[in-house]
């Protein structure tokens, strides 16, 4: 139980640290991440009957749908 | 978002609005980790008319004339669904006046200050505001002294206490 508790503590601390790293990104980079989030979430929301529109991709060297950062972002 | 901000800047330059600032979720994202939203909330002050300072008819008319499309409570400005909100109370008025200048991809813009955003979340008071405020207070840079002053002047101290203790 203690080992599980230690592991959870470590995991939650890592999540919080990752959130702070994301929070420290530049505003344009955050908007690029947001647009990727919108694209990822849109099919699910539309399947639930909610009408959503994904913003036009922001100018970037990365593809707006590049999955690498998709793994690093939590939705609320 | 650049073109949307350029449009808002042109409205301000042409005197259609007196001042604008990014508020809501996108303003929160300026300070904290990105989270899912599809809306861009813009607080505006309009030149005072005899009727009401909250009347946005002129703003909407001008945006339509510039090719923007109204859909429900949103107006699509350069592809982004924007909700234009007049400064509907003294807290929003203050947040708009004191909004900070930023530059977004070389485009000048304004965003509501962190402490005002926190106060607006408290005042709005929905469940999602409470959750957002909790994360925001951990991730964003903000000053307790400035927040205390805002909360005191806008009678929000008891809710802050209720939400944070």
Image (tube, coloured by chain):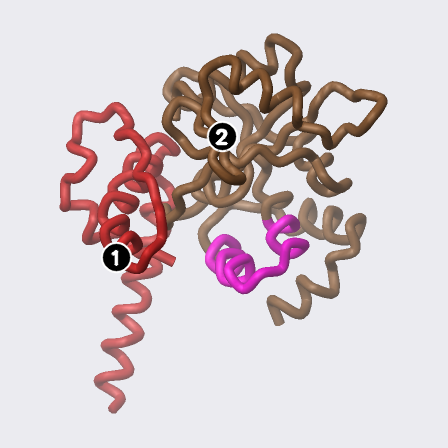
Chain colours: A red, B brown
Q: Chain letter of disc 2?
A: B
Quadrant location, the C terminus of chain B: bottom right
Q: Quadrant of residue A9?
A: bottom left
Q: Is residue A52 left or right of residue B134?
A: left
Q: Is residue B129 magenta?
A: yes
Q: Is residue B163 left or right of residue B153?
A: left
Q: Write down the residue under mark 1.
A: A47
Q: Is residue A1 left or right of residue B78?
A: left
| Residue B157 or residue B73, whichever sits in front | B73
| B129 vs B140: above or below | below
Q: Quadrant of residue B21?
A: top right
Q: Write down the residue under mark 2.
A: B70
Give the magenta range: B118-137
Q: Chain letter of disc 1?
A: A
Q: Is residue A74 left or right of residue A3?
A: right
Residue at 14%, 45% (x, y): give it.
A67
| A17 vs B74: above or below | below
């Amino acid at each position: 139980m203690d080992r599980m508790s230690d592991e959870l503590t470590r995991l939650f601390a890592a999540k919080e640290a990752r959130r702070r790293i994301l929070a420290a990104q530049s505003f344009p980079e955050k908007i690029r991440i947001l647009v990727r989030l919108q694209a990822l979430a849109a099919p699910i929301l539309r399947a639930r009957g909610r009408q959503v529109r994904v913003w036009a991709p922001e100018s970037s060297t990365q593809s707006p749908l590049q999955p690498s950062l998709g793994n690093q972002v939590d939705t609320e | 978002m650049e073109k949307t901000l350029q449009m808002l800047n042109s409205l301000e330059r042409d005197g259609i609005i007196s001042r604008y600032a990014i508020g809501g979720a996108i303003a929160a994202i300026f300070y904290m980790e990105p989270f899912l939203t599809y809306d861009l909330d813009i607080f505006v002050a309009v030149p005072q008319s005899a009727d009401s300072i909250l009347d946005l008819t002129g703003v909407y008319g001008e945006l339509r004339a510039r090719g923007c499309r109204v859909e429900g409570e949103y107006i699509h400005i350069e592809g982004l669904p924007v909700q234009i909100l007049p400064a509907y109370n003294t807290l929003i008025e203050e947040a708009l006046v004191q909004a900070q200048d930023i530059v977004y991809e070389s485009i000048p813009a304004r965003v509501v200050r962190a402490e005002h955003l926190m106060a607006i979340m408290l005042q709005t008071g929905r469940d999602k505001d409470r959750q957002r405020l909790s994360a925001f207070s951990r991730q964003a840079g903000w000053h307790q002294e400035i927040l205390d002053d805002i909360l005191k002047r806008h009678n929000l101290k008891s809710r802050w206490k209720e939400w944070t203790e």
